[in-house]
Image: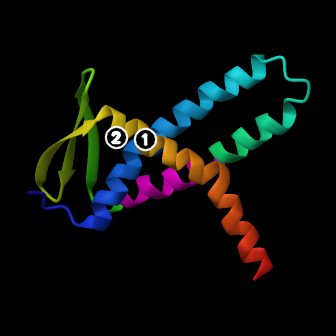
Amino acid sequence: MTRIPAHDRDMIEQAIYLPMLLSVLNRDLLVVQKSPFKLKKPYLELIEETMNAIQVDLAEVKRYLHKNSIKVDRLKSDDAFTMYTFLYKGYEEQHNYFNPRLRNRVEELMRYYLLERFKQRQQEKEA
């Protein structure tokens, strides 16, 4: 059983997922740059703007983890699982994450940052 409260666990998981998402978007950025799109600038701007927003959120997560003396390290991974160790207030916990779960969560976050975030901004402007 984990000793980590839900909010702190969410921040730890953001520290896992957001760098993965940045990695995926960085690869996508390279693909778009090399692609034969006639008008690639809007795609590049969308990806770059999304990456900037993620970097801002990741910096906030890192500040929170540092302020609360929480550390996250990736230990090992195989075809099915990736193991992380969390250092939390003097306790060490190891957690296995199912790789398809990691991929699905990164995909959900990508959908949020590329679509939902803009919808939320639009609703805020209209209100």
> Which amino acid type is marked by label 2?
Arg
Q: Which residue is mark 1?
A: 104
- Point 85% across, 23% down: residue: 37
Given contact means CB atoms under 8 Å apart, are the residues at marks 2 and 1 in contact?
Answer: yes
Classify mark 1: helix, strand or loop: helix
Badge 1 density bin: few <14, some 14–19, many ≥20, Cα 10 Å: few
> Which amino acid type is marked by label 1?
Asn
Q: Residue furthest right?
A: 38
Q: Is residue 42 above or below residue 28?
A: below
Classify mark 2: helix, strand or loop: helix
Circle number at residue 101: 2
- State which quarter of the image contains the N terminus: bottom left
Residue 101 lies, in percent from the top left, at 34, 40
- State which quarter of the image contains the C terminus: bottom right
| Residue 103 location, quadrant | top left
Please provide the residue range marked out in magenta.
52-65
